[in-house]
């Protein structure tokens, strides 16, 4: 039987998971290539034979997505499988149209084929877009578990941006593990804050192996989703976070709308920062898409130590990278803090951007007068450091989840901006989570 020739369109995460679940041992299909998008420096590598399995002794090449049409023709691909997240419905269909015009099938794999079953209960925290506040919710759940005497175990959506053979399974229990696995700034943003809340964090490439290890030490697993992707593990409780600062996105981005329609509990976050009309609009949209879900509202509260130092100063604002780039947000908590605490001015970093950061501002023209904390490579970290040094400011407001000053040597004083959710009266999110834990007899 002729093996169907397949190209998987990805971004170093969902694509590898789909391959592992559906194609690694599938003799009726042959994956001839991956393509890579969204994340810099992840193309022109190979998915290694160690991970690809016996059917792929040479591994599988990874190419830039902009070569897709040429690859379909040259590699005689029969089917293209779409496998990354946080893309508008409009752009997704343009990509599909291009593939179909080349004569290949365009396919998306459903969640049942790629959700692994766990021997321990799983609660997932996903979203309709990147930057909605998943991290805040996961931290909150970790604190609830610790207060009930349960050590939190979090499995994070993959971010394998380095040597894939060295990232098959990653376990983070201390800050030293971040150095041991040579984590990028983006990886640290997702892991470091959870370690500070007492969690053990797993990530990597092969999520069947990761799940097997996590099950050995977890009473309950929290799945911490990336972007607006679907969970890799089958959850007993699906929490989905919605952002009223981007009304309409909850039903116009893939696969965020899928999450919205699946969720058991929908958290409308940032209600303190959004226009009341926008909060109402996303509430109506959520109820229409998923009338059986429980809806709760939370605020996203900003905290700044020594906030009085901001008043009257010229500040450079650094924001969480993915939220500001492919998350479509012009700014975040950092700019909000600068305005709230009376900065004399916010210095736009564009004229002083160095190296790859110049390209970032060109690629994402929606970005406001802020600097995304990008560090996908050592060279880009250096670009970030040089840009900070060049901007004529009195101090830096860093609203990234990590302690940026511990990674970058700079003469600029850095003030951290943190943000956490705050519940409404009755704490409905905590009550729903407690009810879930009570069913499991976790105390």
Image (tube, rainbow, N blue to C red):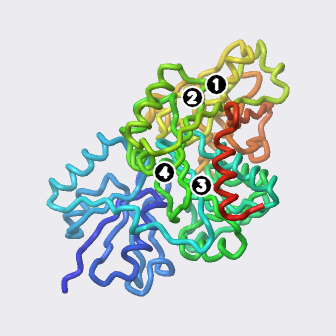
Left or right: residue 346 compared with residue 94: right
* Image: 207 above or below 390: below
- Residue 22 in picture, x, y percent from top left: 38, 73
- Residue 352 in picture, x, y percent from top left: 60, 28
Secondary structure at badge 2 equals loop
**CB atoms at circles 2 and 4 under 8 Å apart?**
no
Q: Residues within 10 Å of mark 1 (few under 14, many from 20)?
A: many
Q: Residues within 10 Å of mark 3 (few under 14, many from 20)?
A: many
Give the mark toward the camera: 3 or 1: 3
Distance from label 3 to label 2 (Cα)?
23 Å
Secondary structure at badge 1 equals helix
Q: Which of the numbered marks, if any, corresponds to residue 335? A: 1
Query: Which residue has dot 3 on it?
Result: 224
Q: Is residue 179 at least partly visible in the picture?
A: no
Give the mark toward the camera: 3 or 4: 3
The mark nearer the N terminus, 2 or 4, is 4
Query: Which residue has dot 2 on it?
Result: 331
Left or right: residue 129 compared with residue 55: right
Distance from label 3 to label 1 (Cα)?
26 Å
Query: Which residue has dot 4 on it?
Result: 39
Give the mark toward the camera: 3 or 2: 3
Q: Residues within 10 Å of mark 4 (few under 14, many from 20)?
A: some
Secondary structure at badge 4 equals loop
* Image: 199 above or below 38: below
Left or right: residue 395 compared with residue 275: right
Q: Which residue shows up at 52% across the image and 65% down it? A: 233
**CB atoms at circles 4 and 1 under 8 Å apart?**
no
The mark nearer the N terminus, 3 or 1, is 3
**CB atoms at circles 1 and 2 under 8 Å apart?**
yes
Asked whether 289 or 376 is in front, the reply is 289
């Amino acid at each position: 039987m002729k093996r169907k020739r397949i190209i998987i369109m990805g971004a170093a995460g969902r694509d590898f998971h789909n391959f592992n679940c559906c194609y690694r041992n599938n003799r009726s299909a042959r994956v001839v290539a991956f393509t890579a998008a969204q994340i810099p420096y992840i193309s022109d590598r190979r998915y290694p034979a160690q991970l690809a399995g016996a059917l792929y002794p040479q591994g599988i090449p990874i190419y830039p997505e902009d070569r897709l049409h040429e690859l379909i023709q040259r590699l005689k691909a029969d089917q293209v499988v779409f496998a990354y997240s946080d893309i508008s419905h409009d752009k997704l269909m343009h990509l599909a149209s291009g593939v179909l015009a080349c004569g290949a099938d365009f396919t998306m794999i459903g969640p049942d084929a790629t959700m692994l079953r766990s021997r321990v209960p799983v609660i997932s925290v996903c979203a309709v877009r990147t930057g909605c506040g998943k991290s805040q919710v996961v931290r909150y759940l970790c604190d609830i578990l610790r207060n009930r005497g349960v050590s939190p175990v979090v499995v994070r959506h993959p971010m394998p941006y380095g040597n894939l053979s060295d990232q098959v399974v990653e376990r983070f229990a201390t800050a030293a593990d971040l150095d041991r696995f040579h984590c990028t700034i983006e990886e640290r943003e997702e892991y470091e804050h959870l370690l500070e809340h007492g969690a053990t964090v797993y990530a990597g490439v092969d999520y069947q192996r990761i799940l097997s290890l996590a099950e050995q030490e977890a009473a309950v697993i929290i799945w911490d989703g990336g972007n607006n992707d679907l969970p890799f593990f089958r959850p007993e409780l699906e929490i989905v976070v919605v952002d009223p600062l981007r009304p309409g996105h909850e039903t116009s981005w893939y696969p965020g709308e899928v999450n919205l329609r699946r969720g058991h509990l929908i958290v409308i976050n940032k209600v303190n920062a959004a226009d009341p009309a926008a909060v109402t609009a996303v509430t109506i949209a959520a109820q229409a898409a998923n009338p059986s879900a429980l809806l709760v509202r939370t605020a996203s509260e900003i905290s700044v130590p020594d906030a009085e130092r901001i008043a009257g100063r010229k500040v450079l604002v650094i924001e969480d990278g993915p939220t500001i780039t492919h998350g479509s947000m012009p700014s975040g908590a950092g700019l909000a803090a600068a305005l709230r605490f009376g900065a004399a001015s916010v210095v736009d970093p564009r004229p002083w951007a160095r190296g790859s950061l110049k390209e970032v501002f060109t690629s994402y023209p929606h970005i406001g007068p802020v600097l995304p904390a990008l560090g996908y490579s050592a060279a880009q970290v250096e670009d970030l450091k040089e840009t900070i040094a060049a901007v004529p400011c009195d101090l830096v407001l860093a609203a990234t989840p990590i302690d940026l000053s511990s990674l970058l040597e700079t003469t600029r004083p850095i003030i951290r901006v943190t943000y956490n959710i705050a519940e409404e009266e009755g704490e409905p999110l905590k009550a729903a989570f407690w009810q879930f834990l009570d069913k499991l007899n976790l105390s």
